[in-house]
Image (cartoon, grey):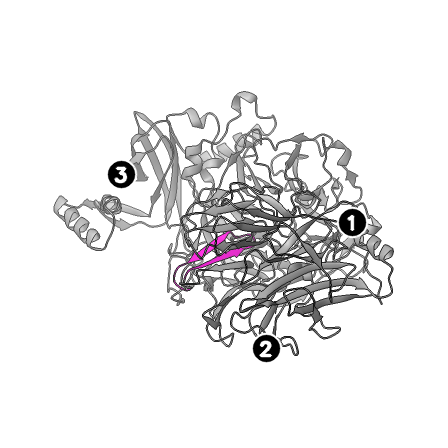
Amino acid sequence: MNLTVKTFRSLIAVSLLTLISVPESMAQKIPDQVVKSIEFREIGPTRQGGRYVDFAVMEKSPKVIYAATASGGLLKSTNNGQSWKFQFDQESVASIGAVALDQKDTSVVWVGTGEANNSRSSYWGNGVYKSTDGGETWKNMGLPESHHIGRILIDPNNSNVVYVAALGKLYSENPERGLYKTTNGGKSWTKVLEVKRADGKYIGVVDVAMSPDDPNTLIAAAYDKIRRPWTFNEGGEGSGIYKSTDGGKNWKKLSNGLPGGFLGRIGVAYAPGNSKVVYANVENVNVEGMSDAERRNMLEVGIPLGRRQSVVGTEMYRSDDGGESWRKISPDGEDIGGYPSYYYQQVRVDPNDEDHVYVLGIQVWETKNGGKTWGTPFRFGGDNHAMWIDPADSKHMLLGYDHGMGITYDAGATWYHPDEISLAQFYAVDVDMAYPYNVYGGLQDNGSVRGPSTSKDGRSIPFEAWQRTGGGDGMYNVIDRSNNRYLYNESQFGPLQRLDLETGESSGIRYTGDRSMRWNWNAPIVVSQHNPDVIYHAGNKVLRSNFRGENWTEISGDLTDNDEVKANGTGNIQYGTITTLEESPIDPNELWVGTDDGNVHVTTDGGKNWTNLNANIPNNPRYWVTRVEASAHVPGTAYVSFNGMRRDDFTSYLYKTTDWGKTWTSIANGIEPAGVNVIREDHNNPNLLFAGTELGVFASIDGGKNWTKFMNGMPTNPAYDMVIHPRENELVVATHGRGIFIADIAPLQGMNAQTLTSDVTLFDIVPAVQYVSGLSNVTAYTNFNGESRQPGSHIHFYTKSAGKATLKIYRGSKEIYKTEVDTKAGLNTYNWRFVEITGERSQDDLNSMADRFRRFGMSEEQVQNRVAQMKYTTRGIGPGTYKVVVEMNGKSDSNEAIVLKDHWNGK
């Protein structure tokens, strides 16, 4: 990038600021007006969908659908799924476990927050919400400590009676577990089913079913589990099925024909057409020949089974007398529903055939004869979590799964998959240096992808613009920015490949020198900024390759606690691993490491010696280290973030050091309580910081003394990773539920206390390419409209007061463009689209244009804005360097706008 003299001087000035801390007199929050003036744009991707967990459909008009997602909020369609609208974006949580629609008063919708599936990316909720206007507005109705909700049922005869199956906290015990009931529409709640083990442990309720004949008759499933960062516990003695016939006043545990001992998750369902018929999908985690004491200890501690040991598995049971007695209807040794049960266990019965049952798992299992035979009928879906069957037409169904949702009208022979809904669950993100630059990332259960940050002509970005770069659960994708050729990406637990984007050649380069190494689900990859041939990868040790992964050297020992029990916990997990690895942009020998068991290390000699910094961090929580960020401005300066979500601690933990970790200062004050996933320091301004948390993005312009929520245009959503593009000065945010968002942060890079008090400040203008747009792509009619950066030079300026400013552009000494800008007090932006003025249109011409725009259906405000833009006749200008001047109230400021030729056309 060509730097202007002014830009160069400002960079020197900013660098000098890092030698001293920001004085208190300079501490400054970002004004609200500035935040509102910088808007994120959403670019997708969408084709892969996201994890759906529940549906609620208006039975008298099934074209109205509510779809709940694990971490993307709530969607509503009023036209059979042809288009969708997000309904829950501005609430304080994003994760949903259940949704229910009042069929008597269909303007009333209930949402239970907090996903009920025990995934590694399952987010908590803060209670039950109610809408009385079809999802337009919401009110929290209580149960804030329920955290994860498995089901909501509404009494069909009395809308004020609602039941909520509450699981409670995922990683620790709490009393707000059980089945809750309100009889006054949510004004107050009563726990009507409280399940406790003999040792006093509270057990949550994961599912509840209501008799189709009597709303006071309920069957509920209690779920005993232990979830820790190092183990997915399978179950316990507290799981079981309970029945009430008096609206929850009294309960009895059902056992006749059901397995006892150690059980896991259970799903229950009545046959809608016959209240005597009940089905249960039971996770049986008993081990043949093992004593209760031994099995109890294994489950409590998280000790895995031996090689020749196995649990009984997931079994299907049926009752023909309303739950009083049960019989097993699944074949021995076959898991109907599949493994892992903590992620599934949903049962659906055909409303018109009591013998026709679906069980959701990795596949959808089906029986048409009451369990005598089973099959997997659909070649659709995968990791299935939600299903709705139309009571009026059993062939009309909805299916929700990890990759999106499907709608069928022929019992699953064909499916319609809405491709335009942005629900991507990213784990990591990176960007290259192409023109326009591309965005890379790994997705939960949907591989790895690459897509453009913008279209050249400013048109929307369709889902077809995205490309797949890897499979499995996509994780880190790191591009060699020196040539944009080599992409390093991985799937879960460390399988690493090098992809040559020029030739298409893919090479597996995972280190195999130590088969005992443990790898995080999302094992960090680093391409050296000092020598792109050097790459780093990390399991529980740090690895270095000097030849793009062709061979590897261990440059550390085990940097974790290496706790043998935790490192070998149960479930699909590896623990005692490195979670974050960072190379200093200043010194290639300075490396920083964080681990899932709370260790922070640094080396200043390329890995020969490592220093554990735990004791130096005040109030060190020893939680999962999510990010270590090395400063690009001052040696020895770094930031570290911890996330306590996996211990049910939602405090924000964020620290800074300026002496290689000898001392640390907390800089989390002002960030809303939530786990911090990522911290980024701006490459131009060391006092500009961004923090991504489980609830969104926060920004600071004073080195972390003050933080401001920075989410204009973004929904509440986990910001899992972020990267700042070094050329375009854009913040790219990867969310775990709503895809990629991008914001132009150029004005923040030059903002400080002095800027905020000056009459007028014109910020540095990012050089812009005058793209040759070429041919446009052919895309699907129903598509996602990813937002592009509009072509032109984006001119940002700050004014102390509102009024009219004059903006002038010069080629050399000649004024070629002049316009008046109505300014707000604060940040203003004008987009110059590479034109010069050649003349002025008459008022008659402008009036004629206004009439034409009105006939097109534009609002009067849109008409006036468009007419103002058309006041002058213009023609395009060529590449070059132009001077921009902003004048207001006798004050002015100037800067340069560089227009670059499109050397990348056709590439």
Left/right placement of residue 293 relative to residue 861 reads: right
SS assignment at label 3 = strand
SS assignment at label 1 = loop
Give the residue at the far top of this rendering: 25
Left/right placement of residue 100 relative to residue 311 reads: left
Which is closer to the viewer, label 2 or label 1?
Answer: 2
Residue type at tag 1 = Ile
Q: What residue do we see at 63% from left, 77% from top?
A: 375
Q: Nearer the viewer, residue 643 or 155?
A: 155
Q: Residue 480: x, y in percent?
A: 60, 55
Task: Count neighbours of disc 3 (C-alpha within 10 A) and say few if under 14, some if 14 to 19, many if 20 or more.
Answer: some
Task: Count neighbours of disc 2 (C-alpha within 10 A) and say few if under 14, some if 14 to 19, many if 20 or more.
Answer: some
Tell me the distance, in whole angstroms, between the alpha carbons under discs 2 and 1.
59 Å
Please tell me whether residue 75 belongs to the stretch shown in magenta. Answer: yes
Q: Nearer the viewer, residue 57 or 673?
A: 57
The magenta stretch is 64-80
* Residue at image mark 1: 555
First along the sequence among labels 2 and 1: 2
Q: Are the residues at dot 2 and dot 1 in contact (C-beta closer than 8 Å)?
A: no
Residue type at tag 2 = Lys
Q: Residue 112: x, y in percent?
A: 55, 50
Q: Is residue 401 visible?
A: yes
* Image mark for residue 735: none
First along the sequence among labels 3 and 1: 1
SS assignment at label 2 = loop
Which is closer to the viewer, label 2 or label 3?
Answer: 2
Residue 587: quadrant of the picture: top right
Left/right placement of residue 338 relative to residue 382 reads: right
* Residue at image mark 2: 368
Q: Residue 515: x, y in percent?
A: 81, 60
* Image mark for residue 819: 3
Residue type at tag 3 = Thr
